[in-house]
């Protein structure tokens, strides 16, 4: 039985029960009317009897008649006053019996459903296309539609001018932080901060896996990277084009972006596990995926689950060994790409710069100049500041300006006004960032991308899609809110 058929059968049963309830109410109404009629007749007869008795007493008193009665005379009945059963005439219609559905402790759902259908046929009950609609009266349907519109429908944003001013200001603050504290990869204060944070994280991860610390006089980060490189080896870690028989151009500066297994996201995890199981390596060049056979690679483990876990640990450990550059790198080194950044290599279109390079090649050259995961963390700081400032200001305004209780001031992105404010804030951040990048790059596409905050644009894009979706669905039913309400009601009824 499908879920829809189950609900339909339940609706049919409720419709029949509603018909039975109406029949019972009508029957009770008839009984009440009959009882009132009987009561009226009894009162009328009592009044007549009282008058007759009064007249009899008056006659007896006037005639000074004395009555003497023996004990035996108490049971005598005047024959002329006796009424036989055949002389009684019923002046009212008899009340019929209610039609019910017999249910015993052995009756199951299927049997009950069959009896419901038989009852419906006998009483000519039409279930219609929507039996649930017939279960409610017109006033109940109007009340339900009103409540759904007020509580469970998707609403648009109703921001005032202060909301827009606050959101724009928060975005401007984030944009100024991006301009003055992020800057180019490896040069800004925040990038240096995230570089040091990454070095510290690599050392801690190495210690967690048994690293004893650097030798005397050796750089601790380079020592930790070397330890991780030797303990988390993978078969897809080709360094340059020579390692792949010159199938495509690759260097030590860009092999982390060209190798799909080095991407710190679901794409990278998928290709890393695939390559470790199949002894292959997958790269991206010219907008195409290139598969290369490698030496046989054997994962540790006795079954698929254990080998899959070993492959995951290998992937994670190898990412930590590469995130701060290689152990032999001079200077900052080439880290791993920002999540999903390698997918830009599939946009192999356009002609940019003096050498008419495609967008895919531009993306690779931007990575080669330090636009990696560490710089991505620095780019995320202005975005985080903008997000937090906007949410905090929304809470403050709602609590102290609109005088709402704290329970109504939870900064959920499902709130349409907050969602609109976040869109304006991040849009302002992107506007400031793009203006700065355009002015400083002087038309150079590589410099423009190096100064652009892709994290901010990604956040703005997700908010824009949510806003478009909300605008398109405005006035429709919010299924998530309805589900939460029904779940809460179900839990309340089960208590």
Image (tube, helix red, strand yellow):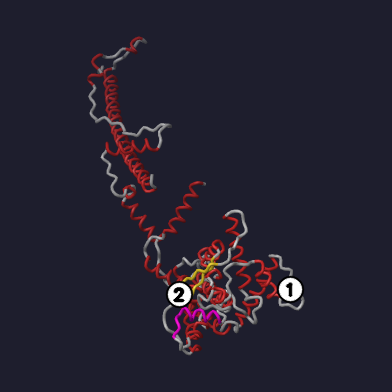
- Overall secondary structure of the magenta section: helix
Residue 450: horizontal and vertical position, in percent?
52, 82
Q: Which residues are magenta?
A: 356-368
Query: Circle 1: is it few (<14), some (14-19), or many (20+) Cα within 10 Å?
Result: some
Frontmost residue, 405 versus 188: 188
Q: Is residue 67 above or below residue 9?
A: above
Asked if the stretch drawn in magenta spans residue 25, the answer is no
Residue furthest toward the right? 216
Residue 28 visible in the snapshot: yes
Asked if the stretch drawn in magenta spans residue 360, the answer is yes
Q: Are the residues at dot 1 and dot 2 in contact (C-beta closer than 8 Å)?
A: no
Helix, strand, or loop for circle 1?
A: loop
| Residue at 59 percent of width and 83 percent of height | 188
Which of pointers 1 and 2 indicates the residue nearer the eye? 2
Question: Mark 2 — residue?
Answer: 287
Q: Quadrant of residue 32?
A: top left
Residue 54: horizontal and vertical position, in percent?
29, 25
| Residue at 65 percent of width and 70 percent of height | 229
Question: Mark 1 — residue?
Answer: 214
Q: Quadrant of residue 82?
A: top left
Residue 254: horizontal and vertical position, in percent?
55, 77
- Answer with mark 1 or mark 2, whichever residue precedes in sequence: 1
Q: Is residue 149 above or below residue 169?
A: above
């Amino acid at each position: 039985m499908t879920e829809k058929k189950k609900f339909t059968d339940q609706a049919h049963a409720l419709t029949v029960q509603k018909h039975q309830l109406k029949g019972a109410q009508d029957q009770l109404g008839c009984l009440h009317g009959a009882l009132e009629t009987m009561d009226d007749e009894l009162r009328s007869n009592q009044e007549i009897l009282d008058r007759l008795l009064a007249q009899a007493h008056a006659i007896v008193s006037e005639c000074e008649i004395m009555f003497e009665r023996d004990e035996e005379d108490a049971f005598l009945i005047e024959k002329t006053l006796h009424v036989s059963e055949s002389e009684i005439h019923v002046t009212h219609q008899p009340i019929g019996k209610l039609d019910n559905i017999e249910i015993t402790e052995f009756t199951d759902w299927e049997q009950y459903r069959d009896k419901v259908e038989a009852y419906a046929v006998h009483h000519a009950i039409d279930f219609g296309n929507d039996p649930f609609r017939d279960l409610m009266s017109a006033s109940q349907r109007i009340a339900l539609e009103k409540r759904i519109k007020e509580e469970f429908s998707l609403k648009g944003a109703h921001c005032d001018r202060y909301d827009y001013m606050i959101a724009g200001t928060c975005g401007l603050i984030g944009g100024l932080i991006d301009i003055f504290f992020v800057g180019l990869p490896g040069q800004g204060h925040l990038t240096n901060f995230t570089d040091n944070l990454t070095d510290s994280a690599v050392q801690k991860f190495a210690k967690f896996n048994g690293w004893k610390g650097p030798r005397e006089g050796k750089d601790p980060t380079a020592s930790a990277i070397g330890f991780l490189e030797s303990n988390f080896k993978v078969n897809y870690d080709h360094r340059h084009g020579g390692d792949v028989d010159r199938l495509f151009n690759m260097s030590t500066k860009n092999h982390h972006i060209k190798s799909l297994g080095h991407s710190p996201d679901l794409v990278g995890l998928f290709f890393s596990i695939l390559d470790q199981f199949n002894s292959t390596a997958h790269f991206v060049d010219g907008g195409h995926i290139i598969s290369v056979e490698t030496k046989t690679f054997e994962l540790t483990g006795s079954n698929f689950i254990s080998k899959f876990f070993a492959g995951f640990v290998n992937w994670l450990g190898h990412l930590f060994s590469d995130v701060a550059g290689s152990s032999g790198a001079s200077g900052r080194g080439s880290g791993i790409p920002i999540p999903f950044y390698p997918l830009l290599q599939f946009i192999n279109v356009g002609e940019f710069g003096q050498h008419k390079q495609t967008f895919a090649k531009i993306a690779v050259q931007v990575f080669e100049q330090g636009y990696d995961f560490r710089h991505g963390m620095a780019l995320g700081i202005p975005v985080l500041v903008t997000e937090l400032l906007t949410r905090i200001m929304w809470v403050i305004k709602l609590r102290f300006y609109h005088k709402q209780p704290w329970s109504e001031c939870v900064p959920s992105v499902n709130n349409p006004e907050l969602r609109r404010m976040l869109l304006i804030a991040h849009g302002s951040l992107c506007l400031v960032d793009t203006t700065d990048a355009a002015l400083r790059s002087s038309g150079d596409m590589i410099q423009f991308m190096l100064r652009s905050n892709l994290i901010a644009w990604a956040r703005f894009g997700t908010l824009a899609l949510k806003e478009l979706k909300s605008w398109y669905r405005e006035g429709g039913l919010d299924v998530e809110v309805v589900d939460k309400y029904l779940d809460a009601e179900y839990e309340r009824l089960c208590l």
